[in-house]
């Protein structure tokens, strides 16, 4: 990484913790400080990776999508996204703020779908080499509270393949996020997302101040 490279910041959390709102607020706060950044997401983030997102979230046309295929599609999209968007922006000195990244694969495919963590680790190395987020903000809230919010937001709308999962699935997802945060406390910063939107934004900005990324 050159001295000019931007920061790679990822935002994680289960459905309904307010991630999308908070990513938008964070972007506004960075803009106000004149910090050159791009906001992106996974799965997706480039036209091709968004096509993969559509397949993995919605478009299976009645066929089953085995968990193994889901895992490989997540990493296929990630490879495309890294090559075409994340790495070029970091090299150009921009911050990359990414709504979900590989922690989500450990949490959803490893925890939720119960795939082997070691296989995920091997795919991570294959696709990313040594690239890891510089900082991950994990927005954590109780599953029941988060799912209630996700359902209210979605009422009347179609649910994707993950949104239709049950609470036990998201408990397993949350458990993996928790374990990863405990194992990597320097990289993964836990945000209490049960609080008000303003309080959550404040915690996120404090995490950046603590690292002297912003003042
Ligand atoms: P989003 O709706 O927050 O954009 O995320 C789409 C879904 O994709 C969400 O339910 C989590 C899931 N997901 C995985 O299962 N594995 C992954 O690696 C990523 C990035 C997302």
Image (cartoon, helix red, strand yellow):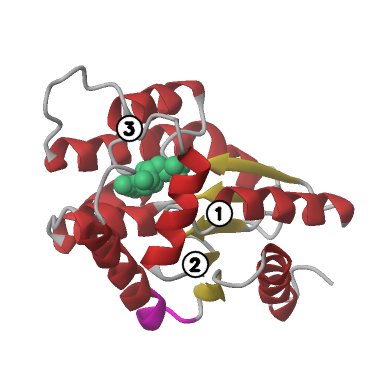
The image position of residue 15, as x and y in percent, is 43, 52
**Up-down relation of residue 52 to residue 138 (above or below):** above
Report whether the residue tagged 3 is closer than 8 Å to ligand 1.
yes
Report whether the residue tagged 1 is closer than 8 Å to ligand 1.
yes
**Going 51% across and 28% down the picture, which residue do you hit?**
46
Q: Nearer the viewer, residue 36 or 26?
A: 26
The answer to whether 35 appears left or right of 194 in the picture is: right
User: Which of the 4 quarters of the picture holds residue 191?
Assistant: bottom right
Query: Which quadrant: the C terminus?
Result: bottom right
Q: How many numbered markers are drawn?
A: 3
**Going 80% across and 56% down the picture, which residue do you hit?**
29
**Going 55% across and 54% down the picture, which residue do you hit?**
19
Q: Which mark is residue 19?
A: 1
Q: What residue is shown with label 2? A: 138
Ligand number 1: quarter of image: top left
- Kindly check if marks 3 and 1 are in contact, taking CB atoms under 8 A apart as contact: no
Q: Counting other residues with Cα less than 10 Å from the Cα at mark 1, is it few (<14), some (14-19), or many (20 or more)?
A: many
| Magenta-colored span | 181-185
Q: What residue is shown with label 3? A: 57
The answer to whether 51 appears left or right of 164 in the picture is: right
Q: Chief secondary structure of the magenta span?
A: helix
Q: What element carries label 3?
A: helix
Asked if one can make out residue 6 in the rendered structure from this viewpoint, the answer is yes
- Kindly check if marks 3 and 2 are in contact, taking CB atoms under 8 A apart as contact: no
The image position of residue 157, as x and y in percent, is 44, 30
């Amino acid at each position: 990484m050159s001295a000019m490279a931007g920061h790679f910041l990822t935002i994680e959390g289960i459905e309904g913790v307010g991630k999308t709102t908070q990513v938008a607020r964070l972007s506004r706060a960075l803009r106000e400080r004149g910090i050159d950044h791009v906001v992106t997401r996974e799965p997706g983030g480039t036209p091709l990776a968004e096509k993969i997102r559509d397949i993995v979230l919605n478009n299976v046309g009645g066929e089953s999508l085995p968990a193994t295929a889901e895992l490989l599609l997540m990493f296929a999209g990630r490879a495309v996204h890294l090559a075409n968007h994340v790495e070029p922006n970091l090299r150009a000195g921009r911050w990359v703020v990414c709504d979900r990244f590989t922690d989500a694969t450990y949490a959803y495919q490893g925890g939720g779908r119960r795939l082997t963590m070691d296989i995920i680790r091997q795919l991570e190395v294959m696709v990313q080499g040594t690239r890891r987020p510089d900082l991950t903000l994990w927005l954590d809230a109780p599953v029941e509270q988060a799912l209630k919010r996700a359902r209210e937001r979605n009422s009347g709308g179609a649910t994707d393949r993950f949104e239709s999962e049950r609470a036990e699935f998201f408990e397993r997802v949350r458990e993996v996020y928790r374990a990863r945060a405990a194992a990597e406390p320097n990289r993964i910063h836990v945000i209490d997302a049960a609080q008000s939107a303003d309080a959550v934004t404040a915690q996120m900005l404090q995490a950046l101040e603590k690292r002297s990324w912003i003042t």
